[in-house]
Amino acid sequence: MILSLLLSFPALLSGCQKNESEANETESGTAAPLPPNEEKPTLDPNQKRVAITFDDGPHNVWTKQIVNELGRYGYTATFFVLGNRIDGTAYKGGDTMSFAASQGHEIAIHGYTHEVYYNKCTNEEYNFELSETDKAIRNWGGGTPTLMRPIGGSITTERVDACPYAVIKWDVDSEDWRYKYKSDDTEEARKEKVDTIVQNVMSNVGDGSIILLHDIYESTYDATRIILERLNAEGYAVVSVSELLGEPVPGKLYYSN
């Protein structure tokens, strides 16, 4: 069982560090579900591919709208979720995660609380973060997770080696969390933030890239719409991390294909 595997991890650093960044939630807007594709298009093996990943969700507005936007292109993404946002402990996002899974998207582990880093927390905290998120994903119909992304990308080599999941980082950072909208932003300021997020992605993306975004911000949704349009125009297929990497191996760290 996953829990027993986690409990066997070697003892590491005893301290833990609180995460200083908190999601600024906006609960406005609506998202009308799109029907899943009847048949997923066959990808050209010579076509350029990227994986778009979303951390820190689910969000009941922006995750749903991002899923709908991906569906317009027949694209698949990977969502690295927080367990306490799925099971209702901190946020009632279980139905949204289930919706994303039902549309064919990959659900993977980020953490349970987003309050500890995996290079500084105790084994007890680390085991809890992974095992409780795994449980929440399974309980809400997200399947059996095989991938994990450490909070802040921080994890020790020893924990990577012992991890029962493939450990996924990224090679393209949108830095979208820096450019989330503020309540007093003008339309010009909002546009500038979206343009910056898009530029951070499109100026660094290449065949085999893993792109980091966060599906809890309206600004990320607005930028994602543009990013998908541009990737499509440049001939990219957008796939899940597992589709990009083939069969990611537990205990191995990946930044890109």
Image (tube, rainbow, N blue to C red):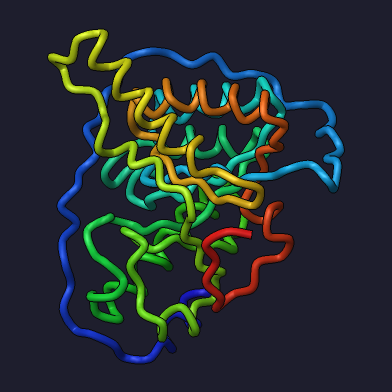
Question: 27 or 212, which is in the foreground?
Answer: 212
**Image position, residue 51 (x, y; %):** 60, 46
Q: Image height check: is 215 above or below 115?
A: above
Q: Is residue 141 visible?
A: no
Q: Tell me if residue 59 comes above or below residue 209 in the rendering.
A: above
**Image-quadrant location for residue 127:** bottom left
Left or right of 20, for residue 236: right
Say if 89 sits above or below 36 in the image.
Answer: below
Q: Where residue 71 sits: x, y (%)?
A: 65, 25
- Quarter holding the C terminus is bottom right
Give residue 69's position: percent from left, percent from top: 57, 22
Query: Residue at 37% of width from left, 91% of height from top?
Result: 10
Left of 99 or right of it: where is 187? left
Q: Quadrant of the N terminus?
A: bottom right
Q: Nearer the viewer, residue 235 or 77?
A: 235
The residue positioned 71% from the left and 65% from the top of the image is 247
Q: Is residue 191 visible?
A: yes
Q: Is residue 169 left or right of residue 42?
A: left
For residue 156, above or below residue 27: below
Judge by depth and name the residue closer to the eye, 8 or 135: 8
Q: Position of residue 112 (x, y in %)?
A: 34, 57
Q: How many marks?
A: 0
What residue is rendered at 49% in x and 83% in y?
Answer: 161
The furthest residue to the top: 187
Is 38 on the left-hand or right-hand side of 6? right
Q: Locate residue 8: give its quadrant.
A: bottom left
Farthest front residue? 203
Q: Residue, x 27% and y 73% (percent of image)?
A: 125
